[in-house]
Amino acid sequence: MFIDSDVYIIEFFAHKDPRFETNKRFFEKVESGIKYTSIFNILEICGVGIFSAEKKKIERLFRTLHEREDMEILYPKDNPVSVETFITNFITQVFERILRKIHFSDALIINIAEKYSISPFITWNKKHFEGKTELKVVTPAEFLA
């Protein structure tokens, strides 16, 4: 399963969010399996967190997420090519997702999930992705049901 940033943001920073308890149950249910996310999700999580936590805590979070045994952080995937070719291909792929009416940061994220064919895609922002990807998109609550 691929887990979107918002699910982790609630876990780490939004304990007063009305979805927190459901989010917590979701992570309890999936705690033993490998969970996938992208480097763009990690950067987004840290970017949100920096407004509520001190810099050292966010730096530690960034390192800790890379060290977790239950998480695999995915990076853009392409065959070994020149930097120029990689950038051109990557920009083209992200732009194709933008043309599906996906916001830029979401396009970066869904591009990685689609390249690795990881489904279901778990997010609280289902409306941002549903019908715009072939991946199965579900909320943590729907996953629990």
Image (cartoon, rainbow, N blue to C red):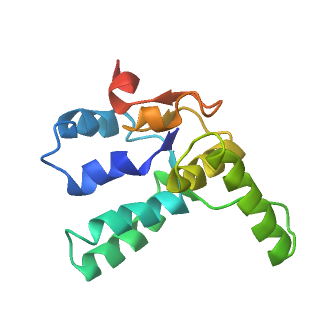
Q: Nearer the viewer, residue 113 or 60?
A: 113
Residue 26 lies, in percent from the top left, at 32, 34
| Residue drawn at x 46%, y 51% as measured from the top left | 70
Work out whether residue 74 can be spotted.
Answer: yes
Question: Splitting the image into 4 quarters, where does residue 20 fall?
Answer: top left
Farthest residue to the bottom: give it: 56
Work out whether residue 116 can be spotted.
Answer: no
Q: Is 130 located above or below residue 13 in the figure?
A: above
Farthest residue to the top: give it: 145
Image quarter where the C terminus lies is top left
Left or right of residue 56: residue 97? right
Q: Is 123 located above or below residue 105 in the figure?
A: above
| Residue drawn at x 31%, y 64% as measured from the top left | 48
Residue 39 lies, in percent from the top left, at 53, 63
Question: Splitting the image into 4 quarters, where does residue 140 fall?
Answer: top left
Residue 37 lies, in percent from the top left, at 51, 52
Q: How many labels were placed on the picture?
A: 0
Residue 34 lies, in percent from the top left, at 50, 45
| Residue drawn at x 24%, y 39% as measured from the top left | 24
Q: Is 67 located above or below residue 55 in the figure?
A: above
Question: Splitting the image into 4 quarters, where does residue 52 fall?
Answer: bottom left
